[in-house]
Amino acid sequence: MARQQPEQQAPPAQWLRVQYAKRGPARFTSTRDFGRAFERALRRAQIPMAYSSGFNPHPRISYANASPTSAATEAEYLEIGLSEVCDPQKVCTALDEALPPGLEVVNVVVSDRRALSEVLTASLWRIELDSAGEGDIDEGALGRAVSGLLAEQEFTISRMTKSGMRHFDVREPILELSVVEATTLELFIRHTTPLVRPDDVVNALRQLEPVLSVSRPAMLTRRAQGELVDGGLRDAMVPA
């Protein structure tokens, strides 16, 4: 007997772009855990989601590249497809109230339907190497490491990934890297494949100045993310 074909779902009536933050202890939420929490919030907030067709329909959610687990962020993005047109600000309020503490919806707008990979091409990060404030960073070594890395044409590091050990250049995508406080860096970096993360940059600095390796793990915060335009970031929530 032929298997009955599943019902075809209607296309979304509206796509919304969602900007969210991970703050405080919520920075330890993994990408998978966030996805589960967000889908629960959609149900609690009674957001009218559109679903995919097939034998296992799932809500129409498009995720962008997420920040590393343990990194705080003010600028993560996803898009949701709705089965009916809704007020974005009402969706923003309802979702924010339904999410657990530390996972916060910052803004919701109607999507211009550009692919998130095109909209999010660079990030601005804050890197605190002495987040405990106990003075265990050699400030002179930090400045030398930054100058040394920026002076290189290429700097290769290694990182274990799901597909094995990868070797890649961390220098090429760095647009700006500076010491903004005694033990705090600001990193402006272009998104590449494979993606160079701020902890990769910290790894490179520690290779250049091994004394920096005695410090605590760096506190990473993504302050902004958007499209690289004329050397700056275009707000991902504003249509091009």
Image: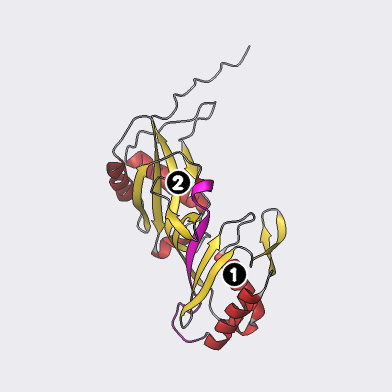
Label 1 SS: helix
The image quarter in which residue 211 lies: bottom right
Tag on residue 58? none
Horizontally, is 44 left or right of 59 in the view? Answer: left
User: Between marks 1 and 2, how big is the CA–CA gap?
Assistant: 26 Å
Q: Characterize the local packing of mark 1: few (<14), some (14-19) or many (20 or more) Cα atoms within 10 angstroms.
A: many
In the rendered image, the vertical position of residue 191 relative to residue 139, given as above or below: above
Task: Please determine whether, in this image, residue 151 is positioned above or below residue 103.
Answer: below
- Tell me which corner region of the image, top left, top right, bottom left or bottom right, holds residue 91: top left
| 183, above or below 234, in the image | below
Q: Nearer the viewer, residue 216 or 157?
A: 157
Specify the quadrant that holds the N terminus.
top right
Q: Is residue 125 magenta?
A: yes
- Which amino acid type is shown beneath numbered disc 2? Leu
Instruction: Tell me: 159 left or right of 47.
Output: right
Q: Residue at x 28, y 38 (%)?
A: 87
Disc nearer the start of the sequence (1/2)? 2
How crowded pointer 2 is (Cα within 10 Å; few <14, some 14-19, many 20+) is rated as: some
Residue 179: image x %, image y %?
Answer: 49, 78
Q: Is residue 230 magenta?
A: no
Q: Position of residue 54 (x, y in %)?
A: 54, 26
Instruction: Report x, y in % for residue 122.
Output: 52, 58
Coloration mode: secondary structure
Look at the image and give the residue range highlighted in magenta.
118-136
Mark 1 is on which residue type?
Val
Q: Which residue is mark 2?
A: 78
| 114 horizontally vs 16: left or right | right
Tag 2's secondary structure? strand
How many marks on residues? 2
Residue displayed at 53% across by 52% down: 65
**Mark 1 highlights which residue?**
201
